[in-house]
Image (tube, rainbow, N blue to C red):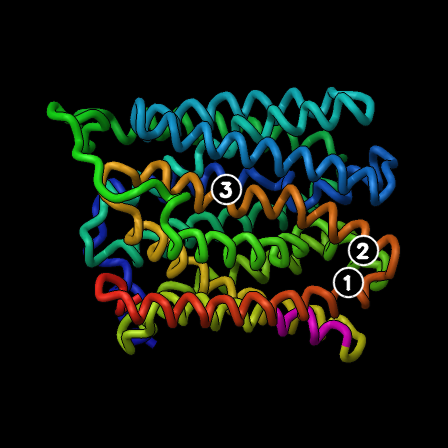
Amino acid sequence: MQKLINTYLNNFRGLSKEIWLLSLVTFINRAGAMVLPFLSLYFVNDQCYTLPQVGIIMTFYGVGSFLGTLAGGRLTDAIGFYKVIVASLFFGGIGFILFQFIDGFYATCIGMFFLIFIADSYRPAVFVAIDVYSKPENKTRSMALLRLAINLGFSIGPLIGGLIIAHINYGSLFWIDGATCMIAAIALFMLLKPKSRVKDEPKTPEVIEGVSPYRNPHYMLLFVIMVLSSITFVQYFSVMPLYWEADYLLTPDSIGWLMFLNGAIIVVFEMPLVAWLEKIKISKSMAVFWGGAFLGVSFLVVNLTTGIWILVTGMILMTIGEMIASPFASTLALEMAPKGRKGSYMALFSMSFSISHMVGHNGGMNLANSYGYDTTWYIMFAFMIVVSALTLWLYYVLKKSPKFDTY
């Protein structure tokens, strides 16, 4: 047992102090983000909106995420990641507290847009911070540590959130989420002072190399793959909880426990899994392929039979896919970004998730409303077959390129 513990801890050695601090702050922020997994339930059960209305609200979520990520990337290149992260966390926290007081469908749509616009400007800034504070050989493990912090927070957050909903009300979630966002901003400001970090603005202008991401065909193919796979992935955070409630009569606290399983598995197994995959020298594009394959199968298995155990099986398969694909996809995107354009490249990469929020929730809600949950899950499985084919194409074109033949 001691050998296993030491092996696990070895995966974290060699990472910079700044990466640890950034991961700590991210954990504080994500632990408070207990509102997000329950948004669809909140809109249906507390606000009495229909599934198509919830889909429209979540589309505004996606538009806010898309434009917020774009603005965050531009601001990161202009003023530095540090200021963007602190401002996004602090003002996003205020936004979460105020959101619960919004009344009416159209006002909710507008409020959702501005809330997520502020909150998701954080994303490209964090990716650039990882690049600045990591040694080249540690970037994938740094990404994995950041994801571990995110998922540790997400595993605890929904669990606590489900208990709060069951025993208090939905409104309490917004207060807690807002407060933890502001605590995270203050903690980052106090722990990661300017004198102890790499300066955002070098004394000499940074050389800008390469082309824009929109003119890079390899990067745009990766972007399309991430958009399509993310459209499928986000079903687990909007349509799937409604399915659990409608077909299996799960309560919010039971849903919280099921989501806790996702985060708990990632916390325990992702770093060793990433280290093992790096040891066997799997290409980053093939890691993305296998991650997508597991995600697709997770939607297929829930239609094969019934019972709580099959929901657990689906969640485990989805989590395995997430652990394999996400850190390698992020590292691949970062390494494909030329010097001086990393903010713009990572903004586009982050916008793939924003687009998935714009399309995925609304599409999933309307599919479930029109054709039922079972048909929706078959469609998601077929969708991931297409994504897998595109990922193999990416692997092939990168292998033909001397610069990216190991990707």
Q: Amino acid at mark 2?
A: Leu
Q: CA distance from mark 3 to mark 1?
A: 24 Å
Q: Quadrant of the N terminus?
A: bottom left
Q: Amino acid at mark 3?
A: Met
Dots 2 and 1: beta carbons under 8 Å?
yes
Say which residue appears at 33% left-offset and 74% top-offset: 282
Q: Give the mark nearer the N terminus: 2 vs 3.
A: 3
Q: Give the mark nearer the N terminus: 3 vs 1.
A: 3
The disc label shown at residue 351, or none: 3
- Quadrant of the rendered structure where residue 103 is? top right
Q: Amino acid at mark 1?
A: Thr
Across and down, in percent, residue 248 comes to 83, 63
Between residues 327 and 66, which one lies in front from this camera angle?
66
Say which residue appears at 66% left-offset and 29% top-offset: 112
Horizontal arrangement in the rendering, residue 140 relative to residue 26 (left or right): left
- Residue 253, compared with residue 285, is above or below; it is above
Q: CA distance from mark 2 to mark 1?
A: 6 Å
Across and down, in percent, residue 242 comes to 79, 53
The disc label shown at residue 367, or none: 2
Across and down, in percent, residue 162 comes to 69, 47
Query: On the image, numbered disc 1 is attached to which residue?
Result: 376
Q: CA distance from mark 2 to mark 3?
A: 24 Å
Horizontal arrangement in the rendering, residue 193 relative to residue 185 (left or right): left
Q: Is residue 267 magenta?
A: no
